[in-house]
Image: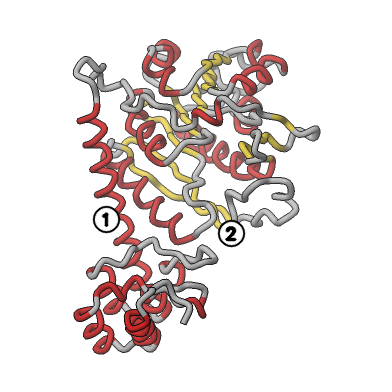
Amino acid sequence: MGDHFEDPELAAIGEELYNACKSNDVEKATIIVASHPVAIHYQNAQEDNRTPLHAAASQSSTQLIRLLLDAGAQWNVVDKNAVSAGELASGDAYEMMVQEGMRTEFVLNLLERKNAVQDEPEDADTEESAPASTQASNASYLSSSLRYTEDGARLLDAEDNGVMMGWEAPLMAAHVEHFREHFKLMRPLPTECEESGAGPTVLNVGFGLGIIDLMLQERVKPSVHVIIEAHPDVVRRMKETGWAEKKGVVILEGRWQEVVEDGRLAEATPDGGFDFIYFDTFGEYYADLREFNDLVPNYLSQEGLYSFFNGLSGTNSFFHDVYCRIAEGDLLEGGLETRWVDLDLTTPDQEVWKGIRRAYWTLPVYHIPLCTFAL
């Protein structure tokens, strides 16, 4: 039978449940789950190791999906080709799967935060501005050597992971254009003939190839342009290419967590906060992004705009939707409301990823997050 159950009898029951879900037989599936709940974990080797939840989702059956989730099926289960059950659902069934993902991840994130607080030493800094994490999640990346390709279109780490790549330019341009439009509602953008000091104030966390920073310099003409960069190779490149001498540019070297904790970011923040904050680091996780999101209100001007590179689960549309919703909820909890603007993309082809260890974006639509203080 080829499934993962060693007991042939249990494997047969699992296959029976799988087929019941595939034929949308709610009554039969309910009986099987009640008598043999472990059958929900069956994987059909003849169909790419798909589970009963995959089968139920393919039928967009809210009854079957609810039955399996309540019995303990994992919302984020994938088959051997990394296809999630949620990707197979549509309509109300898809929304049910997204909601289940949000609920589960919110609970896990809450427990993670609670454990982090309990694990803090008694003499830990408890200031609101101090980040909770002390261990760098991207420590291996920061200690590795980086290299820029000869055409300047790729920044790669020692394992050929794409730290930043030139195909991202249209995304960065869209972020900058939305900030330009937002800022023009606040006051006119400076022109070439105007003295410096008239432009907006911006903060970018994560320089990489410098794509968005160059666009900000050319299209926004910031009066204050603070850049936080953690990797020493990138900082060296910035200095070699003259970024340290650019008018209004302040380079803060180190992890953003360190720059926050030692007060350097506070010192570099203009009175009233930054007009635009952008976040795009490498080698970190959603917990790190969430931690930074919690701090944004401390540094964003009241009429300012915050955004980030939205690569959350960028190779799976279902997981991407779930984490966009989670990020939106976490941001709102911190007082920021999020408007999403869809950007249609020409999905990077195989040639783009040639020589890259793994693709980090394969979706046709990019959701631009535009975050402002909630009214």
Q: Is residue 254 left or right of residue 337?
A: right
> Mark 1 is on which residue type?
Arg
Gap between marks 2 and 1 measured at Cα? 26 Å
Q: Residue furthest front?
A: 7
Mark 1, residue position:
103
Location of residue 261 with respect to 100 vertically, above or below: above
Viewer-nearest of discs 2 and 1: 1
Category of crowding for the residue at label 1, using alpha-carbon neighbours closer than 10 angstroms: few (below 14), some (14–19), many (at least 20): some
Between residue 211 and residue 40, name the one nearer to us: 40
**Can see residue 13?**
yes
Here the colouring is secondary structure
Q: Which mark is residue 364?
A: 2
Sequence order check: which comes first, mark 2 or mark 1?
1
In the rendered image, which quarter is residue 235 located in? top right
Q: Residue at x 39, y 19 (%)?
A: 260
Q: Residue at x 65, y 27 (%)?
A: 145
Q: Secondary structure at mark 2?
A: loop
Query: Where in the figure is residue 9, as x and y percent of width and height?
Result: 33, 83
Q: Residue at x 41, y 36 (%)?
A: 289
Contact, mark 2 vs mark 1 (Cβ under 8 Å): no
**Can see residue 89?**
no
Q: Secondary structure at mark 1?
A: helix
Between residue 4 and residue 114, name the one nearer to us: 4
Q: Is residue 251 left or right of residue 357?
A: left
Between residue 200 and residue 228, name the one nearer to us: 228
Q: Residue at x 40, y 81 (%)?
A: 59
> Mark 2 is on which residue type?
Pro
